[in-house]
Amino acid sequence: MPTFTPHTPEEIKQMLGFLGLDSISELYSHIPDSLKLGRQLAFQGLDSEFDVLSELSLTGETNINSAICFAGYGAYDRLIPAATKQLSARSEFVTAYTPYQPEVAQGVLQAIFEYQTFITRLYGTDIANASLYDGSSALVEAINIATSLRGSKKVVLSESIFHNYRQVADTFSKGTDTEIVTVKESDLIEDLERFIDSKTAAVVVQTPNRYGYLVDLEELSPTISKHGCLFIVVMDPIAASVLKPPGKIGADIVVGEGQPIGMPLSYGGPYLGLFSLREDLVRKLPGRLVGRTYDLDSKIAYVTTLRSREQDIRREKASSNVCTNQTLMAVTAAIQLSWLGTSGILKVAQNSFSAAHYLHSELHKHDFEFAYDKPFLWEFSLRFNQNIDKIIDAMLEEGFLAGVKVTEEFSKEEFLVVAATEKRTRSEIDSYVNALVKITR
Amino acid sequence: MPTFTPHTPEEIKQMLGFLGLDSISELYSHIPDSLKLGRQLAFQGLDSEFDVLSELSLTGETNINSAICFAGYGAYDRLIPAATKQLSARSEFVTAYTPYQPEVAQGVLQAIFEYQTFITRLYGTDIANASLYDGSSALVEAINIATSLRGSKKVVLSESIFHNYRQVADTFSKGTDTEIVTVKESDLIEDLERFIDSKTAAVVVQTPNRYGYLVDLEELSPTISKHGCLFIVVMDPIAASVLKPPGKIGADIVVGEGQPIGMPLSYGGPYLGLFSLREDLVRKLPGRLVGRTYDLDSKIAYVTTLRSREQDIRREKASSNVCTNQTLMAVTAAIQLSWLGTSGILKVAQNSFSAAHYLHSELHKHDFEFAYDKPFLWEFSLRFNQNIDKIIDAMLEEGFLAGVKVTEEFSKEEFLVVAATEKRTRSEIDSYVNALVKITR
Amino acid sequence: MSETNIRKAPGGGNAASIPLMGNKAEPTIFEFTKTHRKSSNLLNQGIEKIDIRSAVADKYLRDEPVNLVEVSERDMVAHFTRLSHRQYSVDLGAYPLGSCTMKYNPKFCDELASLGCFKNMHPGAPASAVQGWLKVMVDLEQILCEITGMSQATLQPAAGAQGELTGLLLMKAWHKDQDHRKSTIIIPDSAHGTNPASVTLGGYKVKTVGTNELGSVDLESLKSILNEDVAGIMLTNPNTLGLFEEDIVEVAQLIHSVNGLLYYDGANLNAILGKVRPGDMGFDIVHLNLHKTFATPHGGGGPGAGPVAVSERLIDYLPGPKPVLLDDGYYDFKIPSNSIGRIHSWHGNSLVLLRALGYILFHGPKGLENISEMAVLNANWLKKRLESTIPAAYDRPVMHEVVLSAQKLSKESGIKALDIAKALLDKGFHAPTVYFPLLVHEALMFEPTETESLDTLEELAESIDMIVEDGKKDLEAIKQLPKNTPVRRVDEALAARKLIATFDSIGD
Amino acid sequence: MSETNIRKAPGGGNAASIPLMGNKAEPTIFEFTKTHRKSSNLLNQGIEKIDIRSAVADKYLRDEPVNLVEVSERDMVAHFTRLSHRQYSVDLGAYPLGSCTMKYNPKFCDELASLGCFKNMHPGAPASAVQGWLKVMVDLEQILCEITGMSQATLQPAAGAQGELTGLLLMKAWHKDQDHRKSTIIIPDSAHGTNPASVTLGGYKVKTVGTNELGSVDLESLKSILNEDVAGIMLTNPNTLGLFEEDIVEVAQLIHSVNGLLYYDGANLNAILGKVRPGDMGFDIVHLNLHKTFATPHGGGGPGAGPVAVSERLIDYLPGPKPVLLDDGYYDFKIPSNSIGRIHSWHGNSLVLLRALGYILFHGPKGLENISEMAVLNANWLKKRLESTIPAAYDRPVMHEVVLSAQKLSKESGIKALDIAKALLDKGFHAPTVYFPLLVHEALMFEPTETESLDTLEELAESIDMIVEDGKKDLEAIKQLPKNTPVRRVDEALAARKLIATFDSIGD
Ligand SMILES: Cc1ncc(COP(=O)(O)O)c(C=O)c1O
Ligand SMILES: Cc1ncc(COP(=O)(O)O)c(C=O)c1O
């Protein structure tokens, strides 16, 4: 039985003696016997860290981890430099708790302050929090702000936001009694007024949307603000480096998934919920916020601030219950964005763009059919007259994760959403196209 | 052209301006033009860290790194826990220079002080230095001490020390004009006196020896000390945890290869030359030595000491030229030995022993022939009437690194030296035996 | 307020080299910027550039590139390395932060989480491509259910609070299906703040039940507020006072008698592994904080993982898609018949789940029991050792943590819980949790955890003795502590009054 | 001397928790020991135990188990993490240690060195199993030869000094084959201490050549000691004063005229990559310090790697076995016909070689040139910037480093080179190399390297200005520095006088 407890038999005896006890079981003597398990837990342990690593490696190798990734849909296979990996693995960051004692937590606090700055610069907003769980939880919190601020319960969601985000919003709307109305994106663009009434708290749009193409936010924002609704935008952070910053063109709250800025695919988590908003909404901000101040010696210091919003102070009056968030991922993002810098993030965007457009044109040459003929960045949707699950399975055999299947909510039509990042090489793309040709013809 | 230089074009201009120069090339203007290369270096660079990693990974994968390792011969495939890996990779240890300024180098200095303590405890000696390059360089330095101390130039080496150590000793003996006499181990044991004369500075023996079996040091030491020669012993550090400590039974200098205490196989380096000796020889100690002292505030502090022995002070009068050593590996060893602890190192020895003896008995069942019938720990030699290189190649095909081929110096007979460590499982050993049967029958 | 800590170098930016062990502030990364300096380099893909502007209309695109930062890799690595030196962590010393279970985080779990075969998997891959991941999840679910005495679990919630809300939505869905009309949830006054906040977000109202003089739920108070409107109760057991709720069976009967459900806040599970199980106490829903009990590192505030396990009658309501093992040995996803829906964008904090499984397998059943035993032993030892300096708020045997009250000390000497906390920082310990739970005055909540040795506990106790002794001699001096930390006591009021939450709003 | 920094806890051992940012000493790992405490756990091999004592005679075995230490993994991790916080490093700040080239060590090289396909290979594997490794070595050898202008190289030497000795043995072997009878090697008075020590170990005698008023080898002095007994000369160029030996061609002609060979100490190669090559200057043997020029991390003292490259006439003497590429594309080992033999137990510090190759490929030819250019620019800028505070020992354009002399300052104000070094530590910089080279009085040898920015250089210069200013006002105060470091000035004399080199000899 390996363990990390340092107690020697002699010490245990000594400590029990100090407590006037004869045995460890007496520590539990005030617990009614009827409640006690009275047997050992029924599962098989292993004998050492080496056994655990070898056993779980065997399990892990049954994942098809050699497949080259053309899937995206909010989770992107991007380059992560060694510097980001090594710095974010420093044990001072990894094994710290929430910075309750700022005097000994300046490392995490300052890194989060820098992270907050980066996120507002990307999104064109004023304030960003210290992170939420993931993209979808960020969306939920945005919706909650809108309904509580507006005192109304209806929220209009574009159908073209990631369907899993929509599902999460649906789930939590049952607690807050929010009415979530899903509208076709084209209908929103054509006649937004039609979907806004006095009970509408917010309109939510994503760009690039879940099919990969771009949505013109500026077409929507005047109407939304005219009605006093909140304009909530979901945007990928790398896309935000090249697209008009939503916060500057009418968005009140901008959220997104931070995975693409420094986190491995990690089978979906831990990821990073990006959350930012206009300054005047700050008292509604969910989660933690780091502010800059001074210490006793007038030295610059960082501290979590506006804590009176938080659940541990406001309890049932809090508008969010988030406590543990994804700080380490926010620190990682700060490191990654520092490494990328102004020129690097543009290059990531540009290289991904070139790769995806090269892929697009190669597919075009082979007469594959695209679901939409609209401007896109590094992700687009393919239409097939074959079963898409089968295509994905067949492509796996060829060594590719072909993309993510999505179903249009209203037409029930299915597409394959395909992404190419700065990590995909020309030869990978060429082989992908060849494999897809082989499989579908 | 990627680079780590931070200079912006503007800064370069500004700095050149400050120097009154117009161009970078003027920095080199005092170098005769005839000497200048005048062309670009002729090799192909790559474009990014990602390109380097992917290109060199491709190269690395042409190594057969899946073969299960039954080779030893001074380099052992042992378990290394995550704690050792992570701590020894901390960048404060990794990116420091030699502790010339003790005030900001207490981390490395104290770790080395702890390392020195561990090594003396293992070898039963009084003083250990801060490391040498590898096992063979430690042997060379030991020989140099002996010859300089005794003012005589002959050193007797047992044939059964690792042949590569002997080769290195031969190489460097050409500089020091040392006469290295290789003697069959059995002759040494039978009649040591015969090989010692007035010019003999030292006798060098290894246990467990290169064939894997144990040598009785106590049989030799009285004779050696009687003649006033130095008794130099080469010993594996894990073996030292169970064998009689050489320093306590007559050895004057004990050296060894530190790889088994925390270093991966690493294709032979960086490894760790272990070097330790009797207190009264300390002024001859090669390399660095850390001592404990106090600072201005009477606080405990560590510092490199007895520096007057060193080459940077004594210059041509120094008896060793070692400057850069293997400090990071010594720090790693201190970490690994702390993790193993008193019980752990014994268990490593015991488990390796059990594995090798199980392997031995299984081979015995299949009538393989052993070169020696002598007590061994985790390594022994097999005799074949087939070409051993071919056996090794065939075993590679079966997924095993079968062992290391050695040639007896005098008889020219060839053996396969086989090792099993605490990392080899029963099923690996069983498959190894099966493969060896298959291949040799 | 002085700005002297940021010294402008003539080059324009700020200097990269800040004292290692000195006490200057570290500039922000933005102050290392210099136009055209750079750090990044990207893979050569062999693809011709297709300019974004050539293919996307200007109306979508930024007029100017986003301004992040322009630093060298060297400066950026040094900056974040220095920041790490300004941060306390478990790896540097004891962290007896009550309710947070800051135990040692095994290094092999880091290695586990960095295995490519797990780390590089895309979450949208079909089940056939992720059999290993699904096995990890199914195995973990089963073991967590065995540990808690429940039937099935969801691994999606990313932290305890999200687990709480998930649990409340499960309650709601179940009550709805049972045609129960209920609008309140009972919570003890000692509860953690996330509990009432979750209740609100779950669409319920909070009713508070009091704590009796023994530190347990006051049964009379409970009975007095209990009625058919009660959807359930949220409890921790041991509770946030570190005390075992000995009347839990009666509490369960009472709640169940009005068709209410019992929710178990698993933050304190570290006390009872293999000893007692929430399911056996009568709980219907349990969340676990894997980042507490199962030692997944807390990362300075997260990530965590908050799986929710439920009893048989609630399994059809669990979130989905849910990894399941089919009869033929294949792993797949299933959406439970009455699922409340999806909680997480994907499958939860997967790498955190993997770490927890590794930790559990390492320990095995006996190892888990050992964890709880030693955690409880440490807490009781510390309680008794400190008795004469700062007594426990409730003088009963505790479980894995102990809440002390400095109320008497504070009245007599002026030394506050906060002063002790800050002074401890100066001695190289992290502070305990202070001023929580709210019902204890001048609360100091110590959770030593099982990985601290007796030596460390003794050093901690001696430090506290010394702090109190010194404080009695010179109260003003102790109010000035800490002095040995990267910054000294921080002006929190100023931070809130004059909010500076980004580098760009400095000097606004 | 007080022992107060080790406080005994009543438990017997010593407490694990020492202030993070305080200034207590850290106990040794041995003081955390407690009988029966443990940290290790080993693989379950599925093999029955065969007791060592049952199979090995007692005469071989220890009477008592070796006493290492008995600590928990938690305490041991904290101990070494805290030690790391007591250590300066490149990753924490600027390290302008002259002659050591402490530039930024790229993180991707760490990743490279941890690839299993390289790291897990046994050095005794046959060539067929290590084709990848042999390709790495052959490629690196070729590029190093291109960089130095030589024909072939050995990668075996583990550091510069071992390379020097290898080079001298090569000389010796060559001279022997040529029937030359020679016994002396010429070395400048500015040379690094390893040079004369290596000469002695190579079996030669040292003759010292003087330095002229320009800081170069004094040709007249050289001519006066030159004769047929001279086996060769060891030089660095740029030399240890950071100056380029402009007369190198003439030096080479002189040495070659007596059948001597020229040895190039590559410690200063960082100044001239892609600009000038030792081979083109007339050198016959070159060692490279990969841990300087090619940024392989120095690890607090090592490991390094010291490949030795030679001109055509010496290739048959190179150490073996030597990795070679055969015509059919297969890599194998070859022992050169007149090989001096083996230098290293195996193939050299292989993982260090791999890192260096990665670094070189990353930069490419242009990148390497850029390195040298910026290194030289930085050194010259710093020299001029400090001119009025501490002038250079030789007022000439320097290469990658500059040697200042505080002699005048010291005479006028009492401020010594050592004081400036120690005061710099307090300001968060590592000190420069001091009192080397020996021929410069009160030498301060600054090598900023190319990875430090102008901002950092300016901050460094300002710090020095400030130190000198402060020292002039209050000399006593500056002699007390550093104050912000983990320990203050250390009693080195005591350490040597009363040697305590192991924990077990404390209190002897
Ligand atoms: C008692 C209790 N409940 C709930 C929580 C919330 O859990 P999390 O931080 O994982 O969201 C905590 C965390 O501190 C807690 O201590
Ligand atoms: C000029 C010079 N020569 C030789 C050496 C010795 O090299 P190494 O430390 O790699 O043995 C050094 C190292 O500092 C040096 O600076």
Image (spheres, coloured by chain):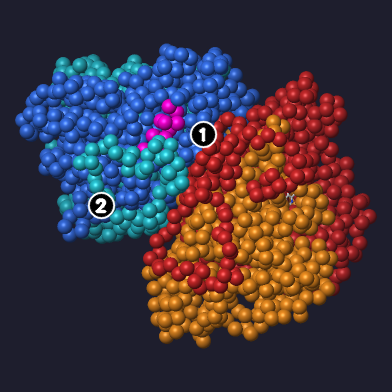
Chain colours: A cyan, B orange, C blue, D red
The amino acid type, in three-letter code, at marker 2 is Ala
Viewer-closest of B435 and C386:
C386
Q: Is residue D439 visible?
A: yes
Establish if D217 lies above or below C404: below
Q: Is the magenta stretch mostly helix, strand or loop?
A: helix
In magenta stretch: residue C378: yes
Quarter of the rendering occupied by the N terminus of chain D: top right
Viewer-closest of A387 and C309:
C309
Q: Identify the residue at horizontal 39%, vertical 22% (top origin).
A: C405
The amino acid type, in three-letter code, at marker 1 is Glu
Left or right relative to C367: residue B125: right
The answer to whether the residues at label 2 and label 1 have Cβ atoms under 8 Å apart is no
For numbered disc 1, what is the local secondary structure? helix
The reply to whether label 2 and label 1 mark residues of one chain is no
Establish if D445 lies above or below A48: above
Q: Identify the residue at horizontal 29%, vertical 39% (top origin).
A: A29
Q: Identify the residue at horizontal 61%, vertical 22% (top origin).
A: C7
In magenta stretch: residue C361: no
Q: x%, y% of residue B79?
A: 48, 58
Q: Mark 2 points at which residue?
A: A42
Q: x%, y% of residue D505?
A: 68, 48
> Quadrant of the rendered structure where residue A399 is?
bottom left
Q: Given the image, what chain letter belongs to the residue carrying mark 2?
A: A
Span shown in magenta:
C375-387
Q: x%, y% of residue C257?
A: 10, 30
Q: Name the residue under label 1.
A: C459
> Within 10 angstroms of label 2, few (less than 14), some, or many (20 or more) residues?
few
